[in-house]
Image (tube, rainbow, N blue to C red):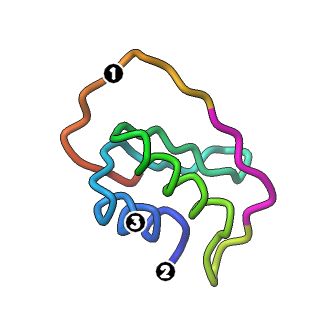
């Protein structure tokens, strides 16, 4: 299972909404909303990568602007 599919599974487990998409530069962009504690858990999970995806770095930015995603999607 790749990073986006694994991220979807983890996001659903943590009741996080948003999306993950591949970028042209071979990175994955993830935008999420949820409880602060669960967001931290998700970010820590991202830093570990998956069996099939190596994570070199994770950049995060917090904002108070909500988009009110209804679920977690992958693109």
The x, y position of residue 57, in whole percent, is 78, 52
Q: Nearer the viewer, residue 73 or 7?
A: 7
Check if mark 3's residue and mark 2's residue have beta carbons within 8 Å.
no
Q: Locate residue 62, reporting x and y percent.
A: 55, 26
Q: Residue 66 carries which label?
A: 1
Q: Is residue 59 magenta?
A: yes
The residues tagged by marks 3 and 1 sit, at their Cα atoms, a distance apart of: 20 Å
Secondary structure beneath dot 3 equals helix
Residue 52, image x and y in percent? 63, 80
**Distance in Å between CA atoms under marks 1 and 2:** 29 Å
Is there CB contact under 8 Å for labels 1 and 2? no
The image quadrant that residue 61 belongs to is: top right
Residue 43 as seen in the image, left or right of residue 35: right
Q: Mark 3 points at which residue?
A: 10
Q: Magenta: predominant secondary structure element?
A: loop
Relative vertical location of residue 1 with respect to residue 10 in this rendering, above or below: below
Residue 44 marker: none
Residue carrying label 2: 1
Magenta span includes 45: no
Residue at position x 38%, y 54% in the image:
74
């Amino acid at each position: 299972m790749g990073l986006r599919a694994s991220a979807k599974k983890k996001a659903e487990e943590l009741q996080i909404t948003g999306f993950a998409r591949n970028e042209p530069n071979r990175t994955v962009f993830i935008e999420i909303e949820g409880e602060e504690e669960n967001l931290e858990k998700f970010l820590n999970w991202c830093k570990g990568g998956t069996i099939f995806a190596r994570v070199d770095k994770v950049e995060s930015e917090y904002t108070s602007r909500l988009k009110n995603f209804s679920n977690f999607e992958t693109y």
